[in-house]
Image: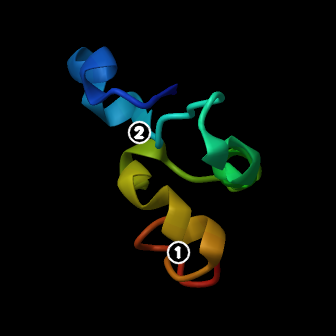
């Protein structure tokens, strides 16, 4: 799994990349940045669920964390 704010950094392995928003620590919004907190919840879900990564859509990870989408298309309970 490759986590980055630039898609081109995992261009050779698109199926293993998870794109997140950039973090700008010097910006005024830095104190409200919760991207990594949500990402940690998502990665914990991935680690504890016994799922095939080929069936996981990493593009919707924020929706999975918020509970609006399931982890996989087959998993309607998560």
Element type at marker 1? loop
Question: Image point 59% across, 36% down: which residue?
Answer: 27
Question: Image point 63% across, 28% down: which residue?
Answer: 26
Q: CA distance from mark 2 to mark 1?
A: 18 Å
Give the quadrant of residue 24. Answer: top right
Considering depth in this image, is 53 or 1 the residue closer to the camera? 1
Q: Tell me the colour scheme of the image.
A: rainbow
Q: Which mark is residue 41?
A: none
The quarter of the image holding the C terminus is: bottom right
Q: Which mark is residue 19?
A: 2
Q: Position of residue 10 (x, y in %)?
A: 32, 20
Considering depth in this image, is 14 or 33 the residue closer to the camera? 33
Give the quadrant of residue 36. Answer: top right
Q: Position of residue 15 (x, y in %)?
A: 32, 35
Question: Image point 38% across, 45% down: which residue?
Answer: 54
Question: Image point 62% across, 79% down: which residue?
Answer: 67
Tell which circle, 2 or 1, labels the residue nearer the N-terminal end. Answer: 2
Using the rendered image of the protein, determine whether residue 64 is visible from the camera's viewpoint. Answer: yes
8 versus 19 height, above or below: above
Using the rendered image of the protein, determine whether residue 71 is visible from the camera's viewpoint. Answer: no
Q: Which mark is residue 70?
A: 1
78 versus 5 height, above or below: below
Considering depth in this image, is 18 or 31 the residue closer to the camera? 31
């Amino acid at each position: 799994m490759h986590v980055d704010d630039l898609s081109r950094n995992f261009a050779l392995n698109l199926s293993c990349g998870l794109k997140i928003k950039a973090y700008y620590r010097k910006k005024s919004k830095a104190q409200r940045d919760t991207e990594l907190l949500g990402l940690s919840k998502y990665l914990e879900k991935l680690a504890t669920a016994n799922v095939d990564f080929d069936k996981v859509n990493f593009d919707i990870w924020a929706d999975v964390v918020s509970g609006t989408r399931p982890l996989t298309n087959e998993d309607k309970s998560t």
